[in-house]
Amino acid sequence: MIVGIGIDIVDIGRFRDRLDEALIEALFLPDEIAYASSRVRAQESFAARFAAKEAAFKALGAGLSQGLRWHDVEVVREESGAVGLELRGAAREAADGMHVTGCRVSLSHTRDQALAVVVMVNE
């Protein structure tokens, strides 16, 4: 059963203009940084991961003002190659309160926009 859905879109140009080393470290965990930095168009990968974090917050029905933090949601690559989410801290607590047993994530981007959809499920 679906218990939460979130979607977010990021303008890559605007995101790129604000993206510096301090912001990267504030928004992303080491494995996310390593993955995105290894890509030819790293800004697109960072933007897609940021969109996934925003979409996850929306799916959880909470945000920074409710205690969620950027490092509470990590975008991971599963062994199959699929993208997934690792929830921790306040995000894990919110998900547990909603009886979330899994997350489905879809990322997409062009040169101009990055999009993420997150579905929280109780299977």
Image: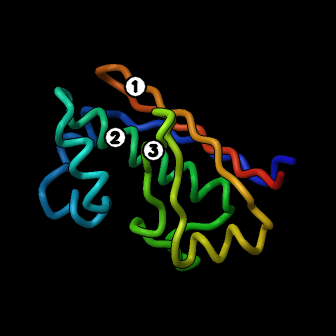
Mark with earlier residue (2, 1): 2
Q: Nearer the viewer, residue 106 or 21?
A: 106
Q: Residue at x 40, y 25 (%)?
A: 109
Q: Determine whether, in the image, residue 18 is placed left or right of residue 10.
A: left
Label 1, secondary structure: give it. strand
| Coloration of the structure image | rainbow
Q: Looking at the image, do the residues carrying marks 2 and 3 touch, with CB atoms under 8 Å apart?
A: yes
Q: Residue 10: name its quadrant.
A: top left
Q: Which residue is drawn at 31% across and 62% down?
A: 29
Label 2, secondary structure: give it. helix
- In the rendered structure, find residue 109 and report the number of the disc placed on it: 1
- In the rendered structure, find residue 47 and report the number of the disc placed on it: 2
Q: Residue at x 43, y 49 (%)?
A: 76
Above or below: residue 97 compared with residue 10: below
Amino acid on which disc 3 is placed: Ala
Amino acid on which disc 2 is placed: Ala
- Residue 71 in percent (x, y) is at 39, 68
Q: Looking at the image, do the residues carrying marks 2 and 1 touch, with CB atoms under 8 Å apart?
A: yes
Measured Cα–Cα span from mark 2 to mark 1: 8 Å
Q: Which of 68 and 37 is in front in this view?
A: 37
Q: Determine whether, in the image, residue 37 is placed left or right of residue 106.
A: left
Measured Cα–Cα span from mark 1 to mark 3: 10 Å
- Residue 28 in percent (x, y) is at 31, 59
Residue marked by disc 3? 51
Q: Residue 87: name its quadrant.
A: bottom right
Label 3, secondary structure: give it. helix
Above or below: residue 40 compared with residue 68: above
Above or below: residue 6 compared with residue 28: above
Q: Residue at x 81, y 55 (%)?
A: 122
